[in-house]
């Protein structure tokens, strides 16, 4: 915090290195393990989410998914990974950038290599978002800070 009580817009490298990482395992992927350090939270950003993610060897970031309304990006800082984008796979490494428009193509990252995969990730944080997990036939519906998971089979047409 700054002396004004507002978050400081400058986050120094040493402070970033000291941030406690939040470990996340996606509930739809038993091989998901990512450690996140939120830069946006520390600087008070409200409409953007920016984090540094670290995926250990042999693990995956999340689960194959896509977004309906929020754009996101990934910029590889160190290590190597396999980016699954649509129906293709690409080896990615330091300096590679991925940008996903909305609605986006399905994507996920996995790390089959022997070093940590570290990347900067970010995207919009709108009041409403729908994320799809097409291989699981499920959707995540987020309204502000409430998250709902729905099976595609349970969705009914409400209005045409």
Image (tube, rainbow, N blue to C red):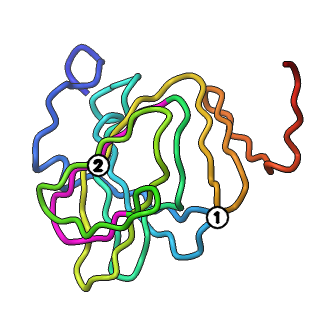
Q: x, y percentage for residue 109?
A: 38, 64
Looking at the image, residue 137 sits to the left or right of residue 64; the answer is: right
In what element is the residue under mark 1? loop
In what element is the residue under mark 2? strand
Q: Quadrant of the C terminus?
A: top right
**Cα–Cα gap, marks 2 and 1:** 21 Å
Q: Quadrant of the N terminus?
A: top left
Front residue of 19/103: it is 103
Answer whether residue 39 is magenta in the image: no
Mark closer to the chain start, 2 or 1: 1
Front residue of 118/95: it is 95
Front residue of 51/80: it is 80
Q: x, y percentage for residue 144?
A: 61, 26
29 vs 114: above or below: above
Looking at the image, residue 16 sits to the left or right of residue 155; the answer is: left
130 vs 150: above or below: above
Bounds of the magenta segment:
70-83
Mark 1 surroundings: few (<14), some (14-19) or many (≥20) residues within 10 A: few
The residue singled out by tag 2 in the image is: 74
Q: In the picture, residue 2 is in which quadrant?
A: top left
The residue positioned farthest toward the top in the image shown: 4
The residue positioned farthest toward the bottom in the image shown: 114
Answer whether residue 74 is magenta in the image: yes
Query: Which residue is at 24% across, 63% downward?
Result: 118
Q: In the picture, residue 22 is in which quadrant?
A: bottom left
Query: Which residue is at 31% across, 46% downward?
Result: 121
Query: Which residue is at 57% across, 62% downward?
Result: 26
Q: x, y percentage for residue 157?
A: 87, 30
The residue singled out by tag 1 in the image is: 28
Q: x, y percentage for residue 97?
A: 21, 49
Looking at the image, residue 104 sits to the left or right of residue 37; the answer is: right
Query: Which residue is at 73% across, 56% downward?
Result: 137
């Amino acid at each position: 915090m700054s002396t004004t009580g507002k978050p400081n817009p400058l986050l120094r490298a040493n402070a970033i290195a000291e941030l406690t990482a939040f470990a996340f395992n996606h509930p739809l992927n038993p091989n998901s393990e990512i450690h996140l350090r939120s830069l946006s939270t520390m600087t008070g950003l409200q409409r953007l989410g920016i984090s540094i993610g670290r995926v250990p060897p042999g693990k995956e970031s999340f689960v194959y998914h896509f977004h309906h309304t929020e754009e996101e990006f990934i910029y590889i800082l160190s290590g190597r990974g396999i980016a699954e984008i649509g129906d293709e796979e690409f080896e990615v490494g330091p300096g590679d950038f991925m940008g996903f428009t909305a609605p986006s193509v399905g994507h996920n990252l996995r790390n089959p290599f022997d070093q940590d995969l570290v990347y900067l990730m970010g995207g919009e944080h709108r009041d409403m978002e729908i994320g799809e997990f097409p291989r699981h036939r499920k959707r995540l519906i987020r309204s502000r800070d409430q998250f709902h998971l729905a099976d595609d089979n349970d969705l009914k047409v409400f209005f045409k």
